[in-house]
Structures are given as C-alpha cells and as structure tokens.
Amino acid sequence: MIESRAVVPGKNVLPDETIVFSALKSYEKCPHPLELITFWDEKKGEMYFLTNNFKLAAATITAIYKERWQIELFFKAIKQNLKVKSFLGASENAVKSQLWTALIAMLLLKYLQLKSQMGWSLSNLAALSRINLLTYRDLWAWINHPFDTGALEPPPQPTLSLYDTLDSISQ
C-alpha cells in the first residue's frame, strides 16, 4: 500500500487505498499504481474494486460497477431467453440488426410480463410465446390465463383476384 484515503461515512466504502503490486511477475505486467476500493454489500459481503481512475470518488466507482452488473444481467437474459448465442452474420449491419431485434423482443416480453396478472417469469413467458407464436389467440386473455385460453379461428380474409391485386398496385 502506498497511500490510504479518507472515506465518506455511510457510503459502505471501507478502505480506499493506492497500491502497487509487489510480486515480480505482477509488477512486470502492471508497474503503475492502482486504486483498491473495498466495499461492503449487505448481500454479498466485502467486494473489492481495482481501478486506474483516480479522478472519481470511491463511491462513484462502486456505483458504476453496480450499474455495469445490471447491464451484464440484461445481456445474460437476452442470451438465455432469446437464444442469441452467436451472430448470424459477420458484418456490422448484421450484428446491429440482430441485436436491435433481440432488444425489441426483450422489450415486448418485459412489457407483457409487466401487464400480465399471472406473474410470469421471463424465461417461461419467452418459452411459451415461442411455442404459441403462430397460433391465433387473444393475447391479453392468453397472457393472464394461458392454460384456459384456447386457440381461435382467424377472421376470414377477403379474397382478391389477380386483377384486383394488379389494379391496386397500379393505383
């Protein structure tokens, strides 16, 4: 330890220290000083954060890592529930399209989960939605009572002749 800084009471930050690695191999890989922040979490106990950003306060660093963890959990949910394990294309556009599609699907699932009276888990809602994707149903009745709501007959669609179709295109 090179230096120890005072911590703000009530922020759950324990020691806030500047350190340099002393083991030879560690020092060769990282010879510059780092900030070691010890944080107390009620659920997880002591947590340690190592950073080279000396400009931000220790409480800010811990808050950033907590938010970063929420992002990790979000991507984990996308991978588990939407089956995005690999990308279908290698171009930037293909990756962006697949991610945007997954984000929209996740948003729709979270909205349905929020509006449902049943108390769905996100994984069950995603799985049953996938199974019922091509079934015609009253969505709100199904989302609240999935085992009591049967499939419906789709409403009849007007049949158009080839001439009606060509006529509507030409207008």
Image (cartoon, helix red, strand yellow):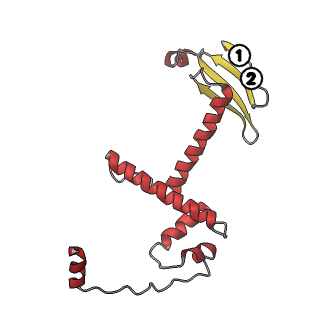
The residue pinned by badge 1 equals 4
In this rendering, the answer to whether 90 lies above or below 125 is: above
**Which quarter shows the C terminus?**
bottom left
Left or right relative to 42: residue 122:
left
| Residue 28 seen | yes
- Residue 58: name its quadrant: top right
In this rendering, the answer to whether 36 lies above or below 93 is: above
Left or right relative to 157: residue 126:
right
Q: Which residue is at the front of the view, 166 or 88?
A: 166
In this rendering, the answer to whether 163 lies above or below 13 is: below
- Residue 41: name its quadrant: top right
The residue pinned by badge 2 equals 7
Viewer-nearest of discs 1 and 2: 2
**Which quarter shows the N terminus?**
top right
Q: How far is disc 1 from disc 2 in space, using C-alphas? A: 9 Å
Looking at the rendered structure, the number of numbered marks drawn on it comes to: 2
Q: Position of residue 88 (x, y in %)?
A: 35, 54
- How crowded pointer 1 is (Cα within 10 Å; few <14, some 14-19, many 20+) is rated as few
Left or right relative to 147: residue 4:
right
Query: Circle 1 — which element?
Result: strand
Going 74% across and 23% down the picture, which residue do you hit? 7
Query: Circle 2 — which element?
Result: loop
Q: Amino acid at mark 1?
A: Ser
Left or right relative to 8: residue 159:
left
Q: Position of residue 108 (x, y in %)?
A: 52, 62
Q: Position of residue 147 (x, y in %)?
A: 61, 79
Going 54% across and 78% down the picture, which residue do you hit? 138
Q: Position of residue 26 (x, y in %)?
A: 54, 19
